[in-house]
């Protein structure tokens, strides 16, 4: 019988009770005494010189308390890039200052140039409309190839070809890779676009700045995935507020997908405005502002080549990618297309030689940064598409070409040619599981049934790997990261035996409150209801780096386990004193400290009580209290992997694609809560299907965002996704963290897009449209129809 | 977006040319125009109310005439700010040539929008601009020639046989 509590049980999510009954407390739900409302005046032009911003008339309007512009922030620092990426010729990364509010120029539609604070939101909006601006419009830089070619037209005047960096990975291998291509029996080449996405968290961004003139303390309520990182960025880089005078609180947050990792100018602006007017200042983004200003995702243009033997053995792989970073460098924008992308270009395969080149390009568009999967979906899509194309060119079965090249279990730990060390995996096992679960043997029969209905059926595979559990600080430090990527947990045993766990991870939909309680309760042998998970408030939690990169369980969860181990170790000392036994003879199991081989025991609650009421306690050798903190820095990334199969039916008359089935066989290492893992995979695959079939962010030649509402930006809806078949029984536990876990949050979004596109191309190939070798995402009916009628 | 079209107007180039330069005619012909003041030399201040898909806005802006070549053609450019709705700008290069019994107007229209209109109405901007241009030149034709035969048959009062602009100048 499956467990009903503790590690491995599908415990229902405790946080859902408040979410589903309207009792969640999001930033927008918070109202402070004497609160005021902010509205940002934003550029309607993609690129313009700011000649003058006249706020006089606006400032005189009813209810207006303050208006600040870029001029008011010139003394402040810039919002920095978190990762330094040098070019392959050794040139330094170009890092233009990203000011709180635009100064000198506006660089994308939506770039904020003024904050208006008023008694009501309507008054603030009216006043913002009354600000008189004198802008000289400049030609917009939208297309990356043109941005690089036309050095006269610059997003930042000091960067002459709009290139942030031109990165080669690994540069020392380049000659060997090129040599392998020169003599390869077969070379497959593919040019593709990884379409730009808007993150679309359900809750738009929101921030409240609250300055206390009496104490000089600042408080920021904000929609963040990592309150400590936000505090660090504001304190150390942008505003110079001492960290001890700034509290950042990220209460319930309704989805992030990466977009709420970053510090945004609005956060600094409401803090500065609050100080200026000595009242709280609240801002809640409208959906239009989310479209215009949340850091977007993906947006790569790639040329990839695979060199093979005629029998399908991979010999070498190389890519040239242009990655759009938008108008300014968002915090992880430089790491995403490089170390989260280039280092994954070996995929799960034995390819001995790999070389990756990435140019990051500034354009007059919203900043682009990590979005669910972050670099790894781009890598996986490129690899899995060219594997299919190569198989078609060589006439090799799609399963067989993968099986032939997948790493085998005896090869771990495996040092990839792009610098990662995969600790463990069994890619054959997940592929076999996929073949069984997806009934791949029955495909031809299903294809015949589709054909009888006038539809073309296709099968698309994707065997993927990711590096997550971000990240070992010593390694990322060598690679240019400007922060550490450990996490932390405090386990506080209260006098009555209940537990408060303070964690640096931040839950914005993942279900941390449930899963972390399962783990702590099982380890301590107590009820889950006695464990409370506290997160999101820098005044309460230890300094952790938050949640992204599928890291919460692997990194913060490991810190939590280590803190629990410290509690148990101290508890043994206390119990030894209480039981008049040697510490070494005390065993802890099932919530009891007992003397080995005897029935003498103290419950966890009795030991906790003794720690806080130390009447009979070894005070001369042991401090009272039972409260332990652990910081955990992972030794390596974790490497979840899996095999996905998508079946589609294409209507050749209309180009309409319907996903008939989607099957996932994943290896996430040990699974803490199978229901939550399945939910994460469903969500990730749903987002991947959105990218593959529907979503596309479109700027026109003038830099106007055309897909700026749900009328033009197609999000996946229930009818667009199938019932998924999800399995995570093929476990190779992570070898270097105490729970043996790998992370599952991004997997679905990483593995699914190529499976969908491979299926569509397969359907057309099987249907006789042999000229169709690739269709860029999203594979909309018009694109499919155009490809068919090419 | 860009579009080009031609329209034959049953009036002499002199009459057509005078009409193009007349702010009253422009006001009458620009769909949604609430006011138009100024002169061909200084440009015209205009207020135009329009609904583009989900966005309603009142644009205030300047219409300027350039490349003026009497009886041959000119360029009409406009740029309007619609407050929170965004902005619109565009122009029409108009050339004239005499044809039998009248004048042929050829026009190339270019239109750009920014801000909320672009964000919410991009799907319909092209058809909106085409409709605006068609409507402008339709009204212009009516103003100069008078209503079409069908409309005339319905309305039929004697005075309406000429276009109102022709009545003004004849």
Image (cartoon, coloured by chain):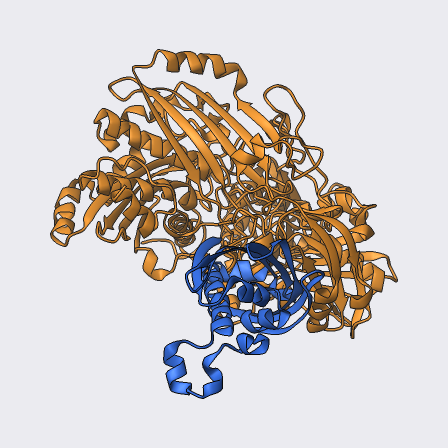
Quarter of the rendering occupied by the N terminus of chain A: bottom left
In-image side of B135 versus A134 (left or right): left
| Residue A140 position (above or below residue B162) | above
Q: Position of residue A675 (x, y in %)?
A: 39, 54
Could you say which quadrant of the image residue A712 lies in? Answer: bottom left
Q: Position of residue A775 (x, y in %)?
A: 34, 40
- Kindly give the residue lying farthest to the bottom in the view shown: B157
Residue in the image at 70% along x and 70% along y? A126
Judging depth in this view, the residue of A600 and A379 nearest the camera is A379
Above or below A375: residue A250: below
Q: Label the blue chain with its letter.
A: B
For chain A, give the colour: orange
Spot occupied by residue B92 in the image (x, y as percentages of width and height): 54, 56
At horizontal 63% and vertical 69% (from top left) the residue drawn is B23
A398 left or right, relative to A407: left
Confirm whether residue B143 shows in the render. Answer: yes
Residue in the foreground of this view, choosing between A284 and A160: A160
Q: Residue furthest right?
A: A214
Nearest the eye: A580 or A699: A699
Which quadrant, please, contains the C terminus of chain A?
top left
The residue located at (15%, 52%) in the rendering is A454
Q: Decide if residue A497 is in sight here.
A: no
**Residue drawn 71% across and 43% down?**
A98
């Amino acid at each position: 019988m499956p467990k009903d509590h503790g590690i491995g049980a599908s415990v229902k999510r405790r946080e859902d009770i408040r979410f589903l009954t309207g009792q969640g407390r999001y930033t927008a739900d918070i109202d402070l005494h004497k609160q005021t409302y902010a509205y940002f005046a934003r550029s309607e032009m993609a690129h313009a010189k700011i000649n003058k911003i006249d706020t006089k008339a606006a400032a005189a309007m009813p209810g207006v308390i303050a208006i600040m512009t870029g001029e008011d922030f010139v003394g402040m620092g810039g919002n920095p890039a978190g990762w330094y990426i040098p070019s392959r010729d050794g040139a330094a990364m170009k890092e233009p200052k990203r000011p709180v509010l635009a100064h000198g120029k506006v660089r994308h539609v939506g770039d904020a140039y003024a904050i208006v604070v008023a008694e009501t939101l309507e008054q603030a909006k009216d006043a913002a409309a009354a600000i008189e601006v004198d802008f000289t419009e400049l030609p917009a830089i939208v297309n990356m190839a043109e941005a690089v070619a036309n050095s006269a037209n610059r997003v930042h005047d000091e960067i002459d070809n709009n290139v942030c960096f031109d990165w080669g990975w690994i540069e020392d291998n380049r000659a060997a890779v090129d040599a392998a291509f020169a003599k390869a029996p077969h070379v497959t080449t593919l040019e593709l676009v990884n379409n730009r996405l808007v993150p679309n968290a359900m809750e738009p961004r929101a921030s409240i700045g609250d300055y206390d003139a009496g104490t000089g303390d600042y408080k920021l309520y904000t929609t963040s995935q990592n309150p400590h990182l936000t505090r660090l960025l504001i304190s150390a880089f942008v505003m110079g507020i001492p960290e001890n005078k700034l509290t950042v609180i990220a209460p319930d947050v309704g989805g992030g997908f990466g977009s709420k990792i970053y510090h945004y100018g609005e956060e600094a602006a409401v803090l500065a405005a609050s100080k200026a007017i000595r009242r709280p200042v609240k801002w809640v983004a409208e959906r239009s502002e989310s479209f215009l200003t949340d850091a977007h995702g993906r947006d790569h243009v790639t040329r990839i080549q695979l060199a093979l033997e005629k029998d399908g053995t991979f010999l070498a792989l190389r890519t040239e990618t242009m990655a759009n970073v938008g108008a300014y460098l968002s915090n992880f924008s430089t790491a995403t297309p490089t170390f989260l992308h280039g280092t994954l270009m070996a995929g799960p395969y034995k390819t001995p030689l790999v070389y990756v080149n990435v140019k990051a390009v500034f354009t007059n568009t919203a900043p682009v940064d990590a979005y669910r999967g972050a670099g790894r979906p781009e890598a996986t899509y490129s690899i899995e598409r060219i594997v299919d194309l190569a198989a078609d060119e060589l006439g090799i079965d799609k399963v067989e070409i993968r099986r032939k090249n997948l790493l085998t279990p005896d090869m771990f730990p495996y040092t990839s040619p792009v610098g990662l060390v995969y600790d463990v995996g069994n890619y054959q096992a997940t592929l076999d599981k996929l073949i069984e679960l997806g009934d791949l043997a029955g495909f031809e029969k299903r294809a015949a049934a589709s054909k009888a209905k006038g539809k073309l059926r296709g099968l698309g595979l994707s065997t993927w790997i990711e590096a997550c559990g971000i990240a070992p600080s010593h390694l990322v430090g060598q690679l240019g990261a400007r922060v550490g990527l450990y996490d932390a947990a405090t386990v506080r045993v209260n006098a009555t035996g209940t537990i408060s766990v303070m964690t640096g991870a931040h839950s914005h939909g993942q279900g941390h409150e449930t899963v972390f309680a399962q783990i702590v309760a099982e380890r301590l042998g107590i009820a889950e209801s006695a464990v409370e998970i506290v997160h999101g408030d820098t005044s309460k939690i230890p300094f952790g780096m938050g949640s992204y990169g599928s890291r919460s369980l692997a990194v913060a969860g490991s810190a939590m386990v280590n803190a629990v181990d410290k509690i148990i170790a101290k508890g043994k000392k206390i119990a030894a004193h209480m039981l008049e036994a040697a510490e070494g003879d005390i065993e802890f199991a099932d919530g009891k400290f007992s003397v080995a081989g005897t029935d003498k025991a103290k419950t966890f609650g009795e030991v906790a009580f003794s720690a806080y009421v130390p009447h009979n306690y070894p005070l001369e050798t042991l401090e009272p209290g039972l409260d332990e903190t652990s910081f955990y820095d992972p030794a390596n990334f974790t490497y979840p992997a899996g095999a996905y199969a998508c079946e589609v039916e294409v209507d050749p008359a209309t180009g309409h694609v319907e996903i008939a089935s989607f099957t996932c066989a994943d290896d996430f290492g040990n699974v803490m809560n199978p229901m939550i893992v399945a939910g994460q995979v469903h969500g990730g695959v749903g987002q991947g299907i959105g990218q593959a079939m529907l979503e596309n962010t479109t700027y026109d030649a003038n830099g106007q965002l055309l897909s700026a509402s749900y009328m033009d930006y197609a999000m996946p809806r229930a009818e667009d996704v199938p019932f998924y078949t999800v399995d995570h029984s093929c476990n190779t536990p992570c070898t270097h963290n105490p729970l043996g876990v790998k992370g599952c949050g991004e997997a679905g979004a990483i593995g699914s897009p190529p499976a969908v596109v491979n299926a569509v191309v397969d359907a057309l190939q099987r249907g006789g449209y042999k000229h169709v070798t690739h269709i860029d995402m999203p594979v909309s009916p018009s694109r499919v129809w155009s490809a068919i009628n090419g | 977006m860009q579009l080009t079209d031609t329209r034959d107007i049953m009036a002499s180039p002199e009459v057509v040319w005078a009409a193009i330069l007349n702010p009253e005619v422009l006001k009458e012909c620009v769909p949604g125009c609430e006011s138009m003041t100024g002169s061909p030399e200084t440009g015209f201040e205009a207020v135009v109310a329009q609904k583009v898909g989900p966005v309603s806005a009142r644009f205030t802006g300047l219409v300027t005439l350039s490349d003026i070549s009497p009886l041959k053609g000119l360029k009409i450019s406009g740029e309007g700010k619609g407050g929170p709705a965004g902005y619109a700008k565009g122009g029409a290069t108009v050339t004239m040539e005499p044809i039998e019994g009248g004048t042929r107007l050829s026009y190339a229209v270019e239109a750009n929008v920014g801000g909320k209109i672009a964000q919410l109405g991009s799907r319909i901007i092209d058809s909106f601009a085409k409709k605006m241009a068609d409507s402008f030149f339709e009204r212009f034709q009516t103003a100069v020639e008078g209503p079409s035969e069908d409309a005339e048959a319905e309305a039929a009062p004697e005075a309406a046989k000429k276009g109102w602009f022709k009545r003004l100048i004849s």
